Image (cartoon, grey):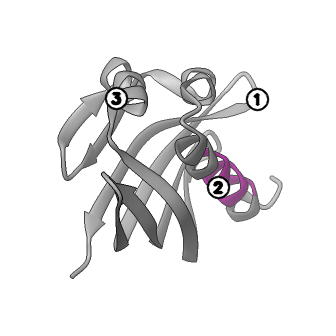
Amino acid sequence: MPDIKKTLVKLEKQFWNADKDRDSNFYKKNTTGKSVAVGQLGVANKKMILKMMSSNPQKLLSYTIQNPRAISLTNDVALLIYKAAGTTVNKGKKSRFSALATSAYVRTKGKWLAAFHQQIQLK
């Protein structure tokens, strides 16, 4: 099996970049049909995530992924756990954030798809 950590970190960065660019098409193509995200706004299914991408007044300006750790649960299911930090802007006001994040990926027909993502904000 190729280096799962390298594969998932690369994919996770693509998700963060898609968030930055508000690229809902990337999310649509790279998440499972039943994907779920959990964060400050609650629990969101795939349809809600896609809608929030275009309507959320908060915009991601920059991010870093720190100390990533990959855990293979099976050959086709893996977790990526890391610390995320970055800057957002909302109605002209910039804010820094720091969070612990977990993403679960499922490999379907040779392609890794995001099935779950959760962030816990750090103080």
- Residues 97 and 43: in front is 97
Quadrant (top left, top right, bottom left, bottom right) of the C terminus: bottom left
Q: Is residue 92 above or below residue 66?
A: above
**Which mark is nearer the camera, 3 or 2?**
3
Stretch in magenta: 7-15
Mark 3 — residue? 55
Principal secondary structure, stretch drawn in magenta: helix
Residue visible at 33% across and 52% down?
A: 118
Mark 1 — residue? 110
Residue visible at 26% across and 77% down?
A: 122
Residue 115, percent across and down? 45, 35
- CA separation in Å, label 1 and label 3: 32 Å
Residue type at mark 3 is Ser
Q: Residues within 10 Å of mark 3 (few under 14, many from 20)?
A: few
Q: Is residue 23 left or right of residue 122?
A: right
Is 8 in the magenta?
Answer: yes
**Tags 1 and 2 in contact by the CB under 8 Å rule?**
no
- CA separation in Å, label 1 and label 2: 19 Å
